[in-house]
Structures are given as structure tokens and as C-alpha cells.
Image: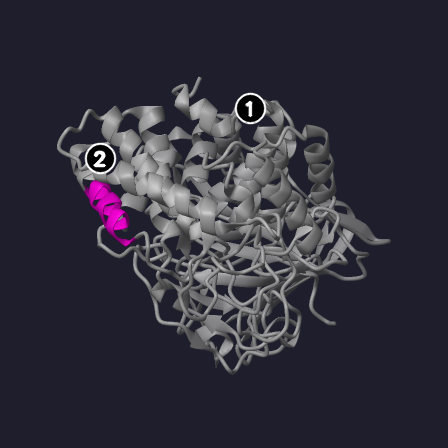
Amino acid sequence: MNYPPIDSYAFLSDTHTAALVAADGAVEWFCVPHFAGDAVLARLLDRDAGGVLELSVAGGAAPTRRYLPDTLVLETRWSTPQGSAIVHDFLSVAPGDEAQPLRADKLLVRRVTVERGTVELAVRVAPRAGYGARDVVWEQAGGRWRATGTDLWVGVDLPGEVTGGELRFAAELSAGTTLALLVGYDDDAADVVDPDELLARTCRTWQAWSARSDYTGFGADAVRHSALVLRGLSFDETGALIAAPTTSLPEEIGGVRNWDYRYAWHRDAALLLLALFRLGHAEEGRRYLHFLLSVCTGELLTPLVDILGSTADEEELPHLEGYAGSRPVRIGNEAAEQVQFDTYGHIMDAALVYQDLTGDLTDEQWALLRRHVDVMAGRWREPDHGIWEVRGPRQHYVNAKVMTWVCLDRGVRLAELLDDRTADVERWRAARDAVHAEVLERGFDPQVGSFVMTYGSTELDASLLRIPLVGFLPGDDPRMLATIDRVRQELEIGPGLLRRYRADDGLPGEEGAFLLCSFELVSALVLAGRRDEASKVFDQLSQYAGPLGLYAEQLAADGTALGNYPQAFTHLALIEAALNLDGAGDREALHAWAARGGH
């Protein structure tokens, strides 16, 4: 396979867009003018048609790479018999203001410093517009090269050569020399173009952000790194968190399970808020809550929106072969049209967390939330499409019912906190109790000995592990203990690696282990009182991280990374698992912390 492993890529972000850098120094994914824009560099999905930005040192062995501490600045060391060089790759950021805490300079910087001897540097800039559909034409003006049909411009202190849609540079550099390639994707890019200042400022900005957290508990290094990844996946203008910066990385190599994840799902909204506040990033937590409520104004909530709060039709791009031949490549996401009642529970859980921590819910926000609780009090008996977005008929998914209970329960609790005597709390409370009773009666199968995926089925799915994490049942309830064991028995494909489900979802082939669920197994084991077992699973999952500490959405049984990358929910579940292991009490640690007002 001539495609690099998915988890071998470095992730760069300026919180406005992202870039993925292969181990050989090639930028193979870059969307402009933002995360959800045109992938003008898309060799990640097609080795020939996808655009690329190559930077290489002639005769160099495989370089070594790392992130500079507490940053998303990639440092790559190249060595040859004649010399050695360090390359710093980053999307430049600067401190912002209260409305936008980090400010994107809208510059991709590739800064090369020769440490000893001489090195021969080669650069090839070959973007293709329309997700690889069209060549560009380079024009030189004002000391910059501009690519027509894109927002890209290139600045470098070297003579360039144009061949077709490619721009090439080459130089022999000696010890002590620093050279920078600047790739802007907006004419309003930063005024500062000094590469040394851009590097220093970007490092200071990320390190100052990371320093807000004083967490030193279980898995502290992985938690801090995961928090950086989450911040890098948060859109600067709105606070939206995208699931991943990529589209169509396959859940099965060569298969059709390829989806666009450059969207904000409302799933685990409460967990994101909890993690942000707990790790010292309250301002980002507030911005996310405001974004969440701003896109939840209709009666029937969509499970996902784009970074600007809209949805887009799903379409296929037949001109791209897909990662390792995994077709089709899709942009847009049809799941936005599904009915997913768990969405209401996640939003109400987030609202309760926010009120517990800040007391800042406004009357207008509460009026909006009340409408959602009223909707679910009237519709909880209906089937839906479920959390896993199976593209088939609606069913009575147990997870959806549990999250409906969460919606009603959080509505009751918020009404009591806010002393709202006009809310129909008795109706909500009656519906909540009815949902709880029904799930225990129809969602637990005594013959199977566990909770099940849907009413009347004997199949399981890994979302059942969240039952104690949302307070539906105690973690050590015998029914929950049995469910944990059966989930592992039926869905585990490797140590700690859980698939989401085995039920037929109407698509050919099968996916790998879903890492969000794998880390949620850790949290469920903690609440079950099985901390040693939880710690062992966490250690096993830690070994599956990519060489730069990043996780994709899924893993094959042999450890091959699958799915879109890096995956926000994997890193979020890692944080939850670590904090639960650190707190290891009789309640889910993050919710208990929030209920105490963040103390």
C-alpha cells in the first residue's frame, strides 16, 4: 500500500483550518479557507490527483519528529552524511481577545534551519482546486506567487520554477542558515512574516493556553495533549468542535464506509464542557455552549451542523480514488437529515453542567431549552435512527431512550435550580419515570443477561456502557456489571478494543474497533468498582496511539488506524477515562466535580 498509515500524519491547526503532514515531510491535506473548505492539498485521498506540498532534504534518512512541548508545532530533524537540518512546521497563531481567544494568522509556515554542514533542500508546491479536480495557474506579483482558483499564495526567498500547475524551489543551504516557506490562504494573513517571530509567537500562544490547566493526575501528559488536539479542532469564529479535520478516511480499507467528519456533532456536548472547564479552559467552554444553543433553535434538532451552524447535502467525488482505494470519497453528510433523540439528552446535560459551573444560563436560553424538554416529553415513545446513524428504518434504540431520560431528568433539575414554577415539571417528571421503567423492562433482556441495542433484539452495542456515565443506573448495578462483561465478550476484537456493534447496518463489509467506546469502557469499569481492570485497559489503549500521540476514529484488530483523523471524540473519551481513573469514586468524577460547582 503506497499510502502512509493514517496515524502517522502530524496534525497542525490554527483553529481556523488544519493541515496533515506525512512522515516524509509532505503536506497531504489542507482545506481552505477553513476546516470545511476545498481540500486544495488532498494527496491523502489520491496519490496522483490530490494536491501536495513537498519539502525534502536530498539523501536524508527517515527524519525524526516530535511536537514542541505543549504546542501543535511540529519539529522534524533531517540528517545526511553532509549535514543536518531542523524543520518547524506550524499554522501560525497569535493571542486573541475575549471573543476569539486564539487568532489565526492564516499562514502555513515551513521554517528550515541548517545545524551543521550543508543540505540540499527541494520544495514542490502542487495544489489542485476542487478537491483535486483542477490544476492551478501560478502568477508572480508583489514578491509572492499566487495560485489562481484558490486562496493560496506562496512567499519564499528563492527563485521559483513553474511546471504545469507545480511551483518548485531548490537550494543548497549551509550551517546557520534559516529559510522559511510561507503559504498564506487569505489576503488578510498576518502582517508579521518574520519566521522566527512567527515560530516564537505561535509557541508562546499554545503554551500559554496549555498552562491554564493545572491537572497533574492520572495520564496527565496524554490529557494535556488531548486537550490541545481538541482546541485545534475547535473553530475560532464560532467555538464549534469538529469531529475530525478530514473526510472519507475509511473505516475499512478498500470499503465504502467513508464519511465526511468536518462537522460538529452534539454528541457528548456535556463531556466536552466538563473537560474544558475542568482543565482550566472556561472561556472555550462558554463559547462552545453559546454555539450549541445558537444552532438548537428548531423543534426537531439535527444531530450535526457545520462550523457555521448549517448543514450540507452529501455528494460523492468520483475523480478521487480514496485512501488506499477506499471509494467513494464523500463531502457533506446525509446523517444531518436523521432523527436522533439522543441529541436532546446531550444538549440538556450540557446545559445542566453549564449552570452548575457558572449559573449563567439566561432566561432566553432556558426558554429555548424548555421547548426541547417539552418536545421529548411528548415524543419519547417514537423510534429514531440511533446514535450510530445506521442508514435504515427507525428503531427503539436503548441508548436513545436513556438519553431521552437524560433530557427529561436534566430539564426537571434545571427547572428546580432556576426556581421556574411555570415549567410543566410534573409532566416532565412523569415522562422521565416512564422512560426509566420502560428501559428496564424492554431494554434489558433477562435471557441474554444484559441490556440490548434495540427493544426486542438480542444484539448489543457499545453505547450501553454510557448508562451509568449519565446516572441512569449506578455503575455497580448487577445489570450493568453483566452488560459490561457481555459487551466485552461480544464486541471486543483485541485487548480493550470494542466495536460499536455487530448488527447488520445495511452496508457491505465491517468496521474496526471504535476508540471512543474503548475509552468509555475504562470509565464504565471505574464506576463498576473495577479500577485495576480499568487502568489495565487504559494502558492497553495508550499503546495504540500513533507516533505523535494522536488517535484516529477506529483501529483494526492488528492496530491499523482507521477512520477520520485525528478524532475529537476519541481524545475526549481519553480525557474522561483518565479523570475518572484519577477520581475513582462512587460517582462519575467529572459530573461530581461539576455538581460541586467546579471544586
> Is residue 596 shown above or below 245?
above
Which mark's residue is nearer the viewer, 2 or 1? 2
- Distance, label 2 to label 1, CA atoms, is 29 Å
Estimate the x, y position of residue 410 in percent, counting from the top left: 33, 35
The quadrant in which residue 311 appears is: bottom left
Residue at coordinates 55% horizontally, 24% vertically from top-left?
586
The residue identified by callout 1 is 586
Q: Decide if residue 197 is in sight here.
A: no
Residue at 51% x, 53% y: name it.
108
In this view, 559 is above or below 595? below
Quarter of the N terminus within the rendering: bottom right
Q: Secondary structure at mark 2?
A: helix
- Considering depth in this image, is 52 or 382 the residue closer to the camera? 382
103 to the left or right of 568: left
The mark nearer the N terminus, 2 or 1, is: 2
- Which residue type does callout 2 highlight? Glu
Question: Which stretch did the figure color magenta?
Answer: 368-379
Tell me the residue that label 2 is attached to. Answer: 426
Is disc 1 surrounded by few (<14), some (14 to 19) or many (20+) residues within 10 Å? some
